[in-house]
Amino acid sequence: MVIGRPKIPSGPSIIEARSREVGNMSSAQVSDIIELMETVINDTSIPKNIRKNVSDARDRLKSADELATSVSSAIYSIEEISEDINMPMHARTQIWTILSALESLKK
């Protein structure tokens, strides 16, 4: 009985598979972040200017730009309001959660 060598996949296919995994992972993370943003946008106890900034950040994140550019733009928009004195405490916690998630995407 002859034992053959196991077939080892070529380098590019491994790289492509990993790149697809990373792309799927980041798109799933973006979807989760957008869902968190929608929660803030739909909360009527949060002042309108804060909801507007979060809505703008969501639109920037959904844009067709490169992911790093969209994330940086969304972070900038949300950081503007993160220390707003009129923000309720529960909203501040949600904003910090969104910022933290966006920062982890930025890498």
Image (cartoon, rainbow, N blue to C red):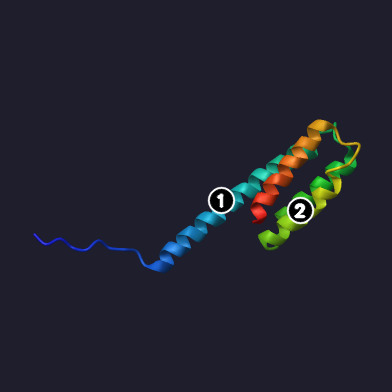
Label 2 packing within 10 angstroms: few (<14), some (14-19), many (20+): many
Q: Nearer the viewer, residue 47 or 88?
A: 88
Task: Assign a secondary structure to mark 1.
Answer: helix
Task: Assign a secondary structure to mark 2.
Answer: helix
Q: Nearer the viewer, residue 57 or 4?
A: 4
Percent from the top left, x then y, of residue 17? 46, 59
**Mark 1 vs 2: CB contact within 8 A:** no
Residue at image x 91%, y 38%?
Answer: 85
Percent from the top left, x then y, of residue 27? 60, 52
Residue at image x 42%, y 65%?
Answer: 13
Percent from the top left, x then y, of residue 4? 18, 63
Using the image, determine if residue 57 lies above or below residue 1.
above
Label 1 packing within 10 angstroms: few (<14), some (14-19), many (20+): few
Which quadrant holds the C terminus? bottom right
C-alpha distance separating marks 1 and 2: 19 Å
In the rendered structure, the answer to whether residue 47 lies left or right of residue 29 reads right
Q: How many marks?
A: 2
In the rendered structure, the answer to whether residue 74 lies left or right of residue 5 reads right
Q: Which residue carries the number 1 mark?
A: 25
Which quadrant holds the N terminus? bottom left
Q: In the figure, residue 39 lies in which quadrant?
A: top right
Residue kind at label 1, given as amino acid type: Met
Q: Nearer the viewer, residue 82 or 19?
A: 82
Using the image, determine if residue 17 lies above or below residue 99.
below
Q: Which residue carries the number 2 mark?
A: 74
In the rendered structure, the answer to whether residue 9 lies left or right of residue 54 reads left
Of labels 1 and 2, earlier in sequence is 1
In the rendered structure, the answer to whether residue 82 lies left or right of residue 64 reads right
Residue at image x 34%, y 64%?
Answer: 9
Using the image, determine if residue 11 lies above or below residue 47.
below
